[in-house]
Image (cartoon, rainbow, N blue to C red):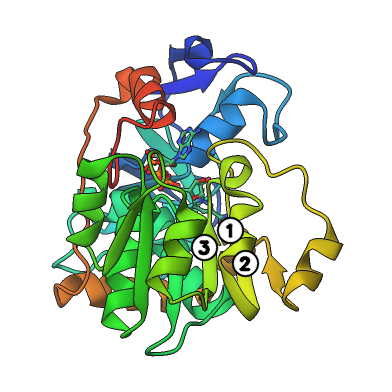
Amino acid sequence: SYAIIARQIGGTDVLEQIDLAIPSPNAGEVLIRHTAIGVNFIDTYFRSGLYPWPVEKDLVLGSEAAGVIEQLGEGVSGFSIGDRVAYTLPNGAYVTHRALDAKHLVKLPEGISDEVAAAAMLKGLTAHYLLHRSYVPERGQTVLFHAAAGGVGLIAGQWLAAKGVIAIGTAGGPEKCALASQHGYGQTIDYRSENFVDRIKEITDGQGVDAVYDSVGKDTYPGSLHCLKTFGSLVNFGQSSGPALDFKLSDLAAGSFSVTRPVLFHFTAQPGYLQSAADALFDMIGRGDIKININQKFPLSDAALAHGELEGRKTTGST
Ligand code: NDP
């Protein structure tokens, strides 16, 4: 049994492998043997110190995983040894074995593999709340989704298309744009070589879009606001290029805009949300409306390499 920990805040070199004893589940917990772990941009935010550490030192990173239940703690009901389960929680997932409160788990239906679950719990539930809670686009509306070829981006594009929403995606480079167009985006913009605000104006006949989903942050602000129609909504849900520090409330006056800065874990903490959103996601995957693209795989011991690729904009889809 081993874990990948960040000894301290820093670059990928602070990640280290340490041996651990297999934990025993306390009351209410189950012991899970992980079979697949998702890598997410949030893991790099914790490692780099952008997000505050919940511990003094030696932080086990990782926020998404799937596995098999090997032991049940006292009083656990609804789960059995051998059940395949998945979860998303901030930190703690870069381990081979984990004891976890059963309330965080969802059971995996037959058609959902462990790898798909580990690639889709955090990213897919994010796509779910973005489109069903944060800004709920109507059929026929037009939205802009940045980093469309990324983990969340490829899932969101397919979900938007299934809802009949016109999705425009940005991505870095022609190959990523081509991939995004195969996953629900009717139009794509290579924001490394084109001015995305000008292109949005062109595509929408000067109207702008109903909403922008922006996880890039610094590099796309305030451009994202300039893409909105009057009364449009900006959903800022990340900062892969760094935080958008120059935001002012008065910026919204240009078009009576709305803005929100949501976090997945606030939604999953709502009673009933985790199971119902996971059901919706697994249903979409099961019906083939959403395909989960696992485009990079690494052994857990190579977590530092995975972080480098993700931060270096070298990945597409899920890792
Ligand atoms: P992605 O697979 O989308 O990877 C991030 C992508 O951002 C890159 O591939 C790159 O795509 C783009 N990007 C743009 N500028 C930069 C930059 N300067 N450095 C690195 N990448 C850049 O990651 P995830 O799917 O894991 O997450 C997507 C985003 O959503 C992240 O910002 C993440 O923090 C956020 N998120 C937020 C959640 C929430 O609840 N608030 C939950 C889940 C994710 P390209 O080359 O095409 O520009």
138 relative position to 290: left or right: right
Q: In terms of sequence position, does the residue under pointer 3 or pointer 2 come before the other? A: 3
Q: Nearer the viewer, residue 270 or 162?
A: 162
Quadrant where the N terminus sits is top left
Q: Is residue 226 above or below residue 286?
A: above
Tell me the quadrant of the picture where the C terminus can be found: top left
Residue 310 left/right relative to 48: left
Name which residue type carries label 3: Tyr
Q: State the image coordinates of residue 125 (x, y, percent, origin top left).
A: 43, 64
Mark 2 lies within 8 Å of ligand 1 (Cβ measured)? no
Q: From the viewer's perspective, is the residue at label 3 or at label 1 nearer?
A: 1
Are there few (<14), some (14-19), or many (20+) residues within 10 Å of tag 2? many
Measuring from the top left, give residue 162's x and y in whole percent.
27, 80
Q: In the drawing, does residue 140 fall left or right of residue 231?
A: left
> Which residue corresponds to mark 1?
224
- Relative depth, front residue between 136 and 85: 136
Mark 3 Cα shell of 10 Å, populated few (<14), some (14-19), many (≥20) = many
Residue at x-position 22% and y-position 60% = 181
Residue 70 visible within the image: no
Pointer 3: what residue? Answer: 213
Position of residue 205 relative to residue 113, above or below, is below
Most foreground residue, 26 or 144? 144
Mark before the other along the chain sequence, 3 or 1:
3
What amino acid is at disc 2? Answer: Leu
Rounded to the nearest angstrom, the CA distance separating label 1 from label 2 is: 7 Å
Relative to 198, is 8 on the left or the right?
right
Q: Identify the residue at horizontal 37%, vertical 66% (top origin).
A: 168
Residue type highlighted by circle 1: Ser
The label shown at residue 234 is 2
Q: Tell me, for residue 77, which label it has, or none.
A: none
Task: Indicate the secondary structure of the residue bearing disc 3.
Answer: strand
